[in-house]
Image (cartoon, helix red, strand yellow):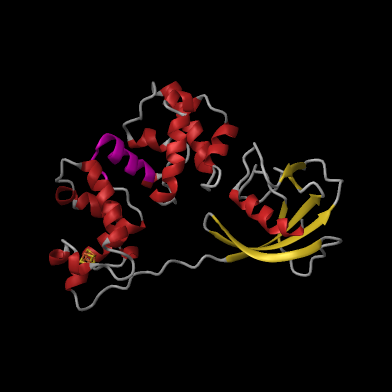
Amino acid sequence: MLQQTQVKTAIPYFKKFTKNYKTLKSLSKSSEKKILKLWEGLGYYRRARNLLATSKILVSQYNSKFPKTIKEIKSLPGIGDYTANALLGLVHDQPVIAVDGNVKRVFSRLINKQESKINFDQFIDINKIKLFNSKRNSDFVEALMEFGALICKPKDPKCNICNLKKNCKYFNSSKKIKINKRKMIEDKNYDVFCYLNKKKQIALTKKNNLGFLNQFNLPEICESKKNASTGNWKFLKRYRNSISNKKLNMNLYYKFSNKIPESFVWYSMEENKEFIPTFTKKIFRQVSILF
Ligand code: SF4
């Protein structure tokens, strides 16, 4: 849950989750539908699917224990280098570092060298005696990430209260490196076509081929094309949405109709037992002004 999500946002979901699934086994036996419903609103739904797939693997292949080698951990669904190292440190107290953007910035400042010029694996290996001299490896993994987020921040690092300032080359240098600004994410334009009916229902399909939110309930969505005809669809409004690392401009079209294409199903815009992603719920809110 904490991949790409702040702790305070994840806490209520975590509580709800652990209340529903008290053991790994019970999680592994759950349906994807139920897991997605509990995850509703947290976003990045691939994580929920990966969690379910992982729980099944852990129960069937690892006797419900978490594997101990980086190779085995990385073979689990959705786990790359960063998460694998974080898990190895946090779960098994191993001397590892989960290298995320925060950690890269801390190291880069400590030696006052641009991130792009540092081979972080090599850096950790060369400095392992200095870095791993704690018996609390799991706390160290966590502390390093938090240190980057709270003290050695991207803008205005809190050097005056930093315990490392004596040995920090960035702090002590008159020629400080420039910290790379985050890359601006390109905006994309999408057209959304909503079939509506008088019962305050909207027709959704899982057959969009978007590359994101695949297999989820959405109206018809396609990338906007210049001068493309929108036929007898009525334009409602333009609004912005962010999903994963994309910034989207949505052009919302609608038509009232009782006939819908075959792969579409009517859904209430008020209450649904089935999981509806936040992205789709935002569309519900936009079109609800028509009722
Ligand atoms: S002294 Fe400043 S730049 Fe250096 S590690 Fe501490 S917060 Fe970061």
Question: Is 138 rendered above or below residue 243?
Answer: above
Q: Can residue 156 be seen in this view?
A: yes
Identity of the residue drawn at 52% across and 57% down: 245
Q: Farthest residue toward the bottom?
A: 174
Question: Is 190 rendered above or below residue 67?
Answer: below
Tell me the quadrant of the picture where the N terminus can be found: top left
Identity of the residue drawn at 51% across and 47% down: 42
Q: Which of 185 and 235 is in front in this view?
A: 235
The reply to whether the magenta stretch includes residue 172 is no
User: Splitting the image into 4 quarters, where does residue 70 fall?
Assistant: top left
Looking at the image, residue 166 sits to the left or right of residue 284; the answer is left
Q: Give coordinates of residue 18: x percent, y percent.
A: 43, 33
Q: Give coordinates of residue 271: x percent, y percent.
A: 66, 42
Q: How many labels does the image show?
A: 0
Identity of the residue drawn at 32% across and 73% down: 178
Q: Give the range drawn in magenta.
A: 83-96
Looking at the image, residue 291 sits to the left or right of residue 40; the answer is right
Q: Which of 242 and 112 is in front in this view?
A: 242
Magenta part mainly helix, strand or loop?
Answer: helix
Q: Give coordinates of residue 103: x percent, y percent.
A: 30, 56
User: Splitting the image into 4 quarters, where does residue 288 fall?
Assistant: bottom right
Q: Nearer the viewer, residue 107 or 51?
A: 51
Q: Give coordinates of residue 149: x percent, y percent.
A: 32, 58
The reply to whether the magenta stretch includes residue 84 is yes
Q: Can residue 168 be seen in this view?
A: no
